[in-house]
Amino acid sequence: MNNQQISKILDEIADILEIQGEIVFKIRAYRKASETVANLPKEISTMTEEELQELPGIGEAIAKKVHTLATTGKLEYYEALKKSEFAPLVDLLQIPSVGPKHARLLYERLGVKTVSDLEKAAREGKIRDLSGLGAKTEENILKGITALFRHKERIPLGQILPKAEKIVEELRKVKEVKEIALAGSLRRMKETIADGDILVSSAKPAPVMQAFVKLPEVERVLSHGGTKASVITKDNFQVDLRVVEPEAWGAAWHYFTGSKSHNVKVRTLAVKKGLSVNEYGLWKRKKRLASKTEEEMYKALGMQCMPPEIREDWGEIELALKNKIPRLVQSEDIKGDLQMHTNWSDGRDSIEEIALAAKKLGYQYIAITDHSPLVGITGGLDEKRVNKQIEEIKKVNKKLKGIRVLSGIEVDIRGDGKLDLPDSALKKLDIVVATVHSRFNLPKDQMTKRIIKALENPVVDILGHPTGRLLGKRDPYEVDLDQVLDAALANGKVLELNGSPDRLDLPDIWVRKARDKGIKIAVSTDSHKTEHLKAWMRYGVAYGRRGWLRKEDLVNTLPLQKFLKLFKIQ
DNA sequence: GCCGTTTTCGGCCCGACTGTTTTCAGTCG
């Protein structure tokens, strides 16, 4: 059983225990373990019980259960829980305003077991008579059931960030707004987002709140209090606004940026020092020690301030205490882009147009990487057209000054691991990016062998979008990434971090692992239009920062001459 | 159920909003 499946079961165990009325700390333990497993860049099935116990939040009992699940795919404890009369009720928890207590009450008093039972009970007006619930809750449950079918999946970052930024710009015009910024997973640049968080500082919250719920984008107001409101936009995503006094800006921004596990750890640290942290500041009893800026908050806790992208409790707190947070890569460090498509295959613009756009961004080089023939619909290049394109690129290089256009290709890795063009053709190119676009359903060992075979081919420079995931659309294919990383390292290959907002591939936890192993990364855009060059590089760089990438971990932060030397390009 | 230079037992992050209540439980993040 893979890590994601195990993580899901641990969460389900927590849900059932919660409905059963277990103590909250036991439930919290399962949730913490679930998160650890989900973010682990290593297959649980390859680990021993002892190794599992080393992981944060996993002790003797859960290690044993997780190990059993990973190796046998079954767990008696889980099976038994699933047979409990409360087990089916976990489905009810996805309805807003139905938590474990209400779920159990609905079951015991009305016999509600499923979402459709719940809907029926609500329509028949039975819920309003339960103690602790009422007519309003009944109405909210019905609304919640309708909404359930609209957006229960997390949304890819690229779909929500531009819209959230637009809302920020609109609210910025409200004169009572002093400071305004994104917070939450949007600020941390997570690849998918559950809802948008916006933070405002203001001495007068009421007009800001009013302006927010009256925005033209707003479809429905979920809640609207004095300093906090939630809305659903017309694009069907939730945006939460919180307003704090200007004095508390730093504390609140830190608090609402998260992540949750980062915050929990920071707070625990504060408690050990006899202090406490909330969204209004760092406190010693009633005395506020810090609150105005994030830097001030961290400093008062004896820590270095750190970029939001790494606040995931993946070791950043320990390093911040030692003042050892590295400088992470920034957009200004990028000197070139190593995957893009032109009108020679499925791109929109010409080689010259995209080269000019890249030059405007201050790049010193780009690689043109149109498709090879296997991906039929994209009009991929055969050997003949490869030769023609090389000539065209020479012409463009003669014409343009200040940017070097490199000839390249995004060549398909066939099912058997062979490349889609003969080595004789690929050898003529400056940069060869190899990728998988077909036969996604190969068994894991075959997929792993297929990719490793490509990595062992001397003509390949870069492995493109290594997991093949399409956010919100297609799961990554089954592949042993540990083996892929080892093969990349052994063969001196570069792994791509594809910045296209549909992909963001490699995933952050694997970027971190690759970096730690010393594997070089290319943050590329996979642009299909000139506009993508800048917009998608922003995503790629931000997401790379989540994987702790420093300037020196990338190949495309090298200045031109060093870059050419590294890839032995004339 | 996890965890430990304040503990192997006794702690475990913190607050807003809602809807139901007459002071707070449940939900949510």
Image (tube, rainbow, N blue to C red):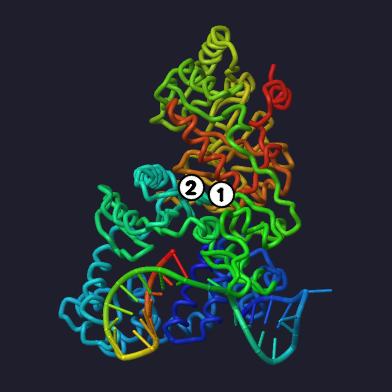
Pinpoint the chain carrying mark 2. A
Q: Is residue A246 above or below residue A347?
A: below
Residue kind at label 1, given as amino acid type: Pro
**Residue A159 is at least partly visible in this image:** no
Q: Quadrant of the N terminus of chain A?
A: bottom right
Q: CB under 8 Å between callouts 2 and 1?
A: yes
Mark toward the viewer: 2 or 1: 1
Q: Is residue A217 above or below residue A7?
A: above
Question: Which residue, given by chain and number where applicable, does mark 1 sit on?
Answer: A507
Viewer-proximal residue among A73 and A442: A73
Viewer-proximal residue among A442 and A98: A98
Q: Quadrant of the C terminus of chain A?
A: top right
Q: Residues within 10 Å of mark 1 (few under 14, many from 20)?
A: many
Pinpoint the chain carrying mark 1. A
Residue A275's tag is none
Residue A469's tag is 2
Residue kind at label 2, given as amino acid type: Arg
**Residue A331 is at least partly visible in this image:** yes
Q: For residue A322, what is the image quadrant?
A: bottom right
Element under disc 1: loop
Residue A187: x and y, percent? 50, 50
